[in-house]
Image (tube, rainbow, N blue to C red):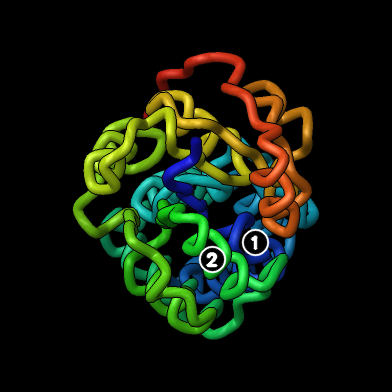
Amino acid sequence: MIKGILLDKDGTIIDFFKVWIPAVRPVLKRILSESQLSFSEQTLIELEERLGIVKGIIDPESSFAWKPFDKIAEDLNQAIEDIYQERIDDDTLKTKLVRYFTKETQGYYPVFTDMVELLRKLKRKGIEVGVVTTDTLESTLECLRTLEIIDKISFLATSDNGFPVKPDRRIIDIVAEQWQCLPQEIMMIGDSPNDMKFALNGNAIPVGVLSGVSLKEDLKRYTPNVLSSLSELEDFLVHKRWVRGVKHVEDSIS
């Protein structure tokens, strides 16, 4: 029996490609300009590729697909150092990434299904719903408020609100205790291999969605449970089609 569902945000609740990809180039240009680093089209392409973005396609295992901003800053800084032989202070770069991406993406949150109605139906079934994301608390709250679902979320873990970061299993232990259930009674739904690793590490049920950065084969390495998007979740739950993941994976971003 499923007693709780954890949702990833970007690529699962909202459209990663419509929200984040258009923001990348303006953010990179602003950071380079403020650092007085000249750039060409080729430089921008190279920096995007180092983050895992190639012609608008995301490598699901790459930095930009799943890491929190502090780790993205480290990877971007290494790329900047390799190209320019200069380095921006890591904390300064992280602060700029958070601020500029928040500005570029704020207020635009296209979804794959009626989230208000979906969460209302889950609540009627007695299923708790939480969100676990590597985005910031400020950005996540803005998204949930705009979508008018914040009152339906009973657990929230972001990269900066005191919880461990995916794929750390401790998050699932914490939420299982809060929801008074077993980890095996929690379903984790996300669009990246990291989301699946997170579920498996915590003994939760991994469910992948193809609405984000991953192809079916990327997710099938970890779970047979793959949906096109959250639009299929209600039917998936009604017919109880899920099974346990295919393997246990210990991984971290340290």
Circles 1 and 2, Cβ within 8 Å, touching? The answer is: no
Q: Mark 1 or mark 2: name the one nearer the start of the chain.
A: 1
Q: Secondary structure at mark 2?
A: helix
Task: Residue 109: give its label.
Answer: none
In the foreground, 1 or 236: 1
In the foreground, 49 or 173: 173
Residue marked by disc 2: 119
213 with respect to 247 (left or right) = right
Residue 220 placement (x, y as % from top left): 71, 26
- Alpha-carbon span between mark 1 and mark 2: 20 Å
Residue 25 placement (x, y as % from top left): 64, 69
At a point 47% along the width and 25% down the height, the residue shown is 200
Residue that protrudes farthest toward the top in the picture:
247
In the foreground, 180 or 190: 180
Residue 13 placement (x, y as % from top left): 59, 62
Residue marked by disc 1: 16
Residue 81 in sight: no
Quadrant showing the C terminus: top left
Labels in figure, total: 2
Q: Residue 180 sits in which quadrant?
A: top left
10 Å neighbourhood of mark 2: few (<14), some, or many (≥20)? some
